[in-house]
Image (cartoon, rainbow, N blue to C red):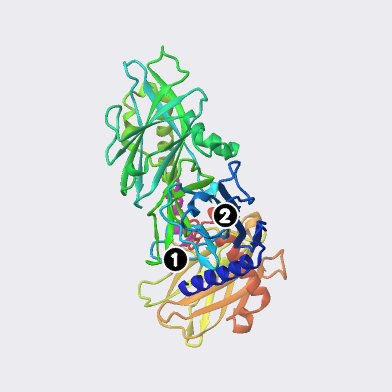
Amino acid sequence: DKTVANAGLTALSTVADSIGNKTHPEDTTERSFATPRLGMKLAKVSVDNSTNITDSSNNTQTMSLPTGGFDVPKSIFQGSASGCANVNTMFLADSDNPFTFADTDNNVGRGVLSLAYTCNGERINVSGTQEPIVLWMERDANMYQESLFVLITNTKTDVWSNFNYHPINLTETNSSLQVILEPQDADSEYYVYLKFEERPNVTYYDYIGFSPNDEVTKLSGYQSLNDSQKQQLRYTVTFPLDLTSSNGTYWIAVKYKRGNIQLADTTANSSYTLLNLVSGCRFWDDENNTWSSEGCQVGPLTTKYRTQCLCNHLTSFGTDAVVAPNTIDFTNVWAKFDKLSENAAVFATVISLVCLYLILLIILRYFDKLDLIKWGAIPLEDNLPTDSYFYQVTVQTGVKRNAGTDSQVRFIVSGEEGDSGVRRLTVAEGKRKHLATGSIYNYVMSVDSCLGPLNFLRIWHDNSGKGKNQSWYLDQVQINDLQTGERFIFLCDRWLAVEQDDGLVDRILPVAGLDDLIAFKQLFSSSARKKLANDHLWVSVFSRPTRSNFTR
């Protein structure tokens, strides 16, 4: 990755120098090149009197691409570009991070900006500038989701009390922390306190801010923002970087300042949305092959839409953006239940949800016990205590209409070394009297000795069921030798009914061979059954198969 990244940057620099050297000195046209991932802009800048794309004072060069942009004061060329009337600009924007080989790239966003100036083929070293170089890095606003909170304020004290506390854990040093707090009532205002490792209050805090804050309109560059960015910035509290330079837990306290409330009430409820922004400006250190924050800091115009970086040097730049969760301070939550009469609706909702959960738990436990009957392997009623050899018999009823039966089913399993004799497909305590449509029932059959390789299965019923439950549509029977693990499959896929098919209720099924098992009809029906009953999201809720990833 390192070799590829360096080779790519070198090649792009060579192309930029070639175009710049062949461009007429008076030609300040901005030239753009773009691919789905990379964007590059080239231009000449007149150090003395530029006619290039500049601001109204003609002292700042501005370039932008979808990934980001920059505003560079031309005063940075004083001394560093002496003897050059024009300098070549190469602005490169990569929508990905080409420096993935660095150990510190985990939190660096996928956008990286590179800015370089050359004069007469030599790169101009720009560092330690007095005026900051402003860079803008676009952010994915869809990554951020505001959370709604309710603040209960006691209005009967001299100083309105009650705070909502929001702890935020910063894992990176030199990160900027911002809180976007937007009241649900346009007339409400809030105090926002910050304290490191401890909960702040009205007299004990590291910083205090306000939301909304109309002072942001005085910030340099505010008028260049769009309406959405201006609106969000009004409700943004940016904490000084020197207060959030260490990693650890920072406590944010929200307190009601003013708004429309009923003073006759003991308490007043107000709601607001809160979003935590953790941002950082990083540059690529070529000497150490790592990302560093030295000489760069997050600007006050940062929003969830884009990050503003203020730097005093040029290289490749990136930003780290962490979506800090809006955690819940449970000690503060339970403290609000000290007077249940004031929170009756909330308390009743919580109790109702707990009761509903317990009721559903009991019902689902009941169904789990039924599943033991449905899916468990239950011994046949006519097993003898003296038998010492065991088989598992799996009977699958088809999914046709009225395929189930209440008739008494009997069968004989024949192998090369003997047969099982006539066996009843019934279990003790009257369980599984009905072979339901689409059911898969497992039984344990015991015999006195091994039957050897199985040859055929004879199965029939006495047609004793009532009405629609007389006939039976048998899909297949599987018999597993529990001692050797061998499995024998007997395919039927026919009716055992006097009024269906050929009118027979007695079938002799040979053991299925490989050709039978890989036949299209068999593969299609078995696959469709599995996909529908076991893997389908909603059907599996009601069929409750034992191996379903959703219901189990």
Neighbour tally class for label 1: few under 14, some 14-19, many 20 plus, Cα within 10 Å: some
How many numbered circles does the render carry? Answer: 2
Q: Can residue 38 be seen in this view?
A: yes
Q: Nearer the viewer, mark 1 or mark 2?
A: 2
Return the residue at label 2.
67
Residue lying at 50% horizontally and 70% vertically, measured from the top left: 5
Q: In which quarter of the image is residue 397?
A: bottom right
- Measuring from the top left, give residue 500's x and y in whole percent: 71, 65
Specify the segment rendered in magenta.
362-382
Q: Is residue 474 visible?
A: no
Neighbour tally class for label 2: few under 14, some 14-19, many 20 plus, Cα within 10 Å: many
**Is 70 contained in the magenta span?**
no
Residue lying at 48% horizontally and 78% vertically, measured from the top left: 420
**Is 375 contained in the magenta span?**
yes
Return the residue at label 1.
377
- Measuring from the top left, give residue 315's x and y in whole percent: 47, 60
What is the spatial separation of the Cα atoms under label 1 and label 2, in whole angstroms? 62 Å
- Measuring from the top left, give residue 509's x and y in whole percent: 61, 78
- Residue 26 in the image: above or below residue 287: above
